[in-house]
Image (spheres, rainbow, N blue to C red):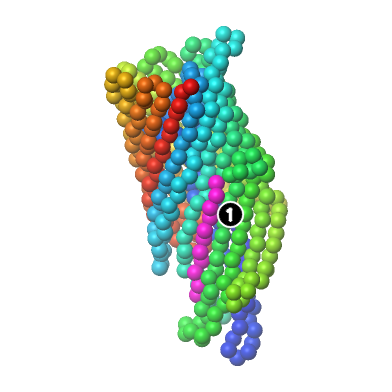
Amino acid sequence: MKKYHKIWLPFFSLIGVAICDAQLLQTSLEIANPNPVGSGARAMGQANAFIAIADDATAASWNPGGLSQLERPEFSFALESIYRRDRLNSENGRTESLDLQDFNFASVVLPFFYLDRNMVFSLNYLKQFRFDREYTLPLSTKVGNFDVDSDYVFDQEGDLSVIAAALGVDVTPKLYLGVTLNLWHDSLTQSSHFTKNETQTEADLLLNGAPIGATLPPVVEVNRFEVEEGYSFVIGAMYRLSKAWAFGAVIKPAFTLDFDHERTVTEFNAGVPNQLEDIDQNAELEFPLIIGVGTAWRPNDELTVSGDVTWAQWSEYRFEEGGVNNNPITSTRNQLRDTFTVRVGMEYLLILKENLIPLRCGLAYDPAPAVGEVDDYYTVNLGVGVQIKNRVNLDIAYEFRWGNDVNGDSLQGFNATQDIRRHRILASLIWYF
């Protein structure tokens, strides 16, 4: 989510004439890939091609229509580790890396019968979006005969999480329906906020290309965004045509989050802070409509093959603040391109005497929105698990995600793009009680 703003820097000359000018830093609020984080190692091991499977607690996120397939009470949670390497494609570009360990989801599932129908209620904590990202870029500005050379340092961290209540029901022996209510309030989740720190480092002042032995003080801007109010729904359905074939569909209607936005700009003269700006105001982030369909084929007890297609209406993705309504990637009125995500996955079960060992793999094309052509991202996924005495499930999955020449919209002020390489490991535990 990009904002254009002015950081005023004092200029001065050697002959005693003060020069003042304004430098415009084109930076962004930034969701590098505003797609859901995704929950559960079982789904990720199959490249998240899970709409027509959705037979564990993560169905609340992928397709709540699958929840009623669960027959026993259970508790589950997942942890993840992410390592990302970003290479900047620009003059004097640099390579940055990010190492992150975090909580992914937790859930309690309670099946029950009502009106002779199987129903399942689940209460969930779900990580939805991540904002962790950092990079450094050279910054050069020319004012008359003066050149100002410094670095622009971007450091963003935080996430958006929800508390979600979900209900699934068997409408008929073949048709299942479900709905999830997501609550986004930071006061409830304690994890629905993020902070963006931008620093223009101490700058060297040059005259006609030659250093003059003078510098300009560093300037730091801090933006903190906290969700004050917001809710959303996930509506899902699953239809079992036969023992071998299942079909699923999910709709995530558009919704709006209300943010409290705190912004401060501080200049540091000889290490002494001088606050240039301090603003606290409300903002709204409008998320798009998302529709997904999927199918799963299970020719025998050991093998399941699944595929999903998801459409996201990113052209309606908007950020409104101070009466200005723009798309969050470029902070312009230009519409973003809608995206289609395609995922395929496979699970093969090794059925042993007392234990069950699933082997999983998958591929996905998972683009991110942009004003021009969408940013192309791809994933390769692997997963393995073990079911111990029909009481405990342990799963682990690995995902390699990559994209070349992406994030050009976010970095357009620097005429740069990035090559992204991300390694992600997700581990889940399910305990039946």
Compared across the picture, whether 199 is left or right of 187 comes to: left
For the question of whether residue 376 can be seen, the reply is: no
Total labels: the figure holds 1
Height in image: 93 above or below 367?
A: below
Q: Residue at x 38, y 32 (%)?
A: 395
Residue found at the far bottom of this picture: 15
Q: Which residue is mark 1?
A: 195
Considering depth in this image, is 1 or 196 the residue closer to the camera? 196
Can you tell which quarter of the image residue 15 is in? bottom right
Height in image: 125 above or below 211?
A: above
Can you tell which quarter of the image residue 305 is in? top left
Q: Main secondary structure of the magenta part?
A: strand
Q: Position of residue 277 (x, y in %)?
A: 68, 65
Q: Position of residue 73 (x, y in %)?
A: 51, 21
Mark 1 surroundings within 10 Å by alpha-carbon count, few (fewer than 14), some (14 through 19), many (20 or more): many
SS label for mark 1: strand
For the question of whether residue 19 can be seen, the reply is: yes
Q: Position of residue 320 (x, y in %)?
A: 66, 49
Considering depth in this image, is 420 or 405 the residue closer to the camera? 420
Q: Position of residue 227 (x, y in %)?
A: 64, 45
Q: Amino acid at mark 1?
A: Thr
Compared across the picture, whether 120 is left or right of 21 comes to: left
Compared across the picture, whether 225 is left or right of 60 comes to: right
Q: Residue at x 36, y 25 (%)?
A: 388
Q: Residue at x 50, y 51 (%)?
A: 132
Compared across the picture, whether 291 is left or right of 386 comes to: right
Considering depth in this image, is 355 or 132 the residue closer to the camera? 355
Q: Residue at x 35, y 38 (%)?
A: 381
Residue stretch rendered in magenta on the structure: 149-159
